[in-house]
Image (cartoon, grey):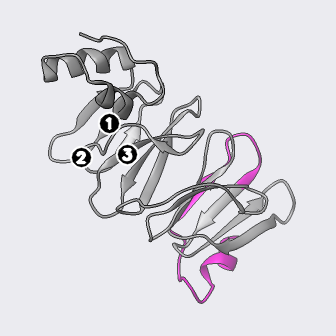
Amino acid sequence: SLLDDLAGSPEADFVIQVSFAHNSPLLVASTGQQTAVWDLSTDPPTRLAKRRTGLTAAFTPDDLIITSDQNGTMHLRDPATLEPLAEVGGLPYPAVYPAFTADGELMVTTDDTTGAGRLWRLDDLKPFGGPLDGYGAAISPDGTAVVLGGEVAQHLTLDPDEWSDAACETAGRNLTPQEWEHYFGDEPYHQTC
């Protein structure tokens, strides 16, 4: 079968993640060591690329591929070659099970060891806030919320106006410029409370 080529390699016995492209007839699969991409529009399907990329691989909404390795590095990759286009390293744990907002602006991943959720900006692979307590994470179909599993499931809005209100309520004061930069990045600083 199509995936036997990948799973039958000496590096792995089985495929751990597969993902279809959103806007093209491509499929990516990962064994946790090797990743391969196929064009499903041909008969038989044509393998476009195969290389060692690490733990996971999934298509983003704009049909690039996000991979994560065991050393805490994520790459945004070209789907035709699997060559890296962007990289973020130094993560405390591998980032697995990516999910995306429909507009492709944000991604949520799960830390492979702790299960904490992390939000990322896809345009620059920068973190969007800190780790989210819970185990496992998903983005709602309409892209307005993140849901985290755990002992108690959490529903967190992705609406920055609601974040400002919650931050004011929790802190009992306006955010400092340093706190603002940490949570809101390049958005211009202004009074929130």
For badge 1, the amino acid type reads Val
Q: Badge 2 local density, few (<14 within 10 Å), some, or many (20+)?
A: some
Q: Nearer the viewer, mark 3 or mark 1?
A: 3
Q: Which residue is mark 3?
A: 118
Q: Is residue 19 located in the magenta-colored stretch of the structure?
A: yes
Q: Which mark is residue 107?
A: none
Q: Is residue 34 left or right of residue 119?
A: right
Residue at point 73%, 56% (across, down): 79
Where is residue 73 shown, x and y percent of the image?
49, 62
C-alpha separation, residue under disc 3 versus residue under disc 1: 11 Å
For badge 2, the amino acid type reads Gly
Q: Which mark is residue 134?
A: 2
Q: Which residues are magenta?
A: 1-26
Q: Main secondary structure of the magenta part?
A: loop
Q: Quadrant of residue 62?
A: top right
For badge 3, the amino acid type reads Arg
Q: Which mark is residue 147?
A: 1
Quarter of the rendering occupied by the N terminus: bottom right
* Residue 175 to residue 51: above or below: above
